[in-house]
Amino acid sequence: MNEYAEQEIHSWKQHKTVLHKAGQRLTTQRHFTIIQATSMKDKCEATKAVYDETQSDLERVNKGYPIKESVLEVFGKGSMPEQFNWAMGIYIKNNGQWVICDEENHRVQVIDPIKLCCDLILQFHAFPNPFDPWNVTVDEDNDQYFMSDRGNGQVVVSSGQSKILNCFGRKEGIKPTGVCLSPDGFIFIGDYKGYVRKYNKSGEHIARTEKGQVSLPSGLIVNKKCIFVSDYGRNRVHVLNHQMQSIRDIGKGHLEDPMGLCFDHQQDGIYVCDYGGQRVVHFNCDGEFLSYKGQGQLEKPRFIALCKDNPYRLVVTQEYCIKLLYI
């Protein structure tokens, strides 16, 4: 384990102590809510709500999870491993590794979340312009990394050993942003020229949205029924079916320059990075607003992923660091 990782783990242990104290203060605030209640009925309802919420927090702490709405910052600015210069898209693998685009360092880092160290760096020097990764998704069955390369207007496909397997999108003149893999094996790409595009894994262009359906697509996630597109230019999440037909909008009035998004742990809701609002917004998949997360604790959040081993932890990329948001 390197010295930086040891420092981060030490910081985490200190952070847990702070969280326990914060939990005590939070419990005091909740009891004040009971005192404020006027009628006996209100006092009973407030007491039950406080008890349930406090028990929930105690269960989380006993399992080693921090209380809700706490944030831990990891890594920092620089060009060494475990440092970032314009952290962008993130994908979390089934083994727990964080795959993070480090755009202005022209690389993708694969991070061990337990040791907080870099296991792998993907870098490429075979292109006319610097490799500028915006987003990434992984076909884990075939160990293939699909990375949107803004510097060269393409999607780069590589193995875990940085061997280039394919490049596509230049023929269509794309300006790629979000990239995701659908359950049936297609690749969906956000094109900042105002389209969402569908490719097969070989890089053959299958379809795209019509002009005007989306403005500036940034992040993309896909399930068996729908494609959810964060539309930076229209302050919304636009929902499409797999035939690229528009279904509905989500988030109007709650979003300002949305970027990355991910499904919640039950797959029936989405978390959206509200870049302009400097928070994360939670909606159900039908578009109902549920809550804000991380207000006052995030600074221009870019992309987001939910940890596979911890349903309470979101990993959020910012300009020069990564933040863990406990929900």
Image (cartoon, helix red, strand yellow):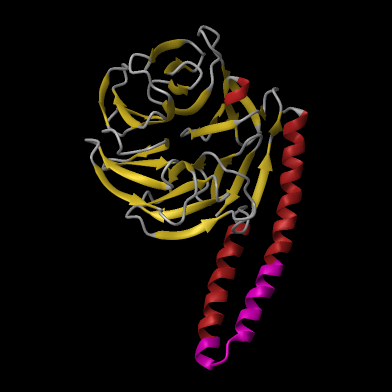
In depth, the one of 167 and 163 nearer the eye is 167
Above or below, 174 against 113 in this view is above
In depth, the one of 131 and 194 nearer the eye is 194
Above or below, 35 against 74 in this view is below
| Residue 290 inside the magenta-drawn segment | no
Magenta residues: mostly which secondary structure?
helix
Q: Residue furthest bottom?
A: 39
Residue 89 position, x and y percent, is: 51, 32
Residue 146 position, x and y percent, is: 43, 22
In depth, the one of 295 and 161 nearer the eye is 295
Residue 24 position, x and y percent, is: 70, 68
Left or right of 264? Residue 100 is: right
The reply to whether residue 97 is visible in this rendering is no
Left or right of 47? Residue 152 is: left
Read off the magenta span.
24-43
| Residue 34 inside the magenta-drawn segment | yes
Q: How many badges with numbers are in the image? A: 0
Task: Identify the residue shown where x is 75% and y is 35%.
Answer: 6
Residue 93 position, x and y percent, is: 48, 32
Task: Identify the residue shown where x is 73% and y is 38%.
Answer: 8
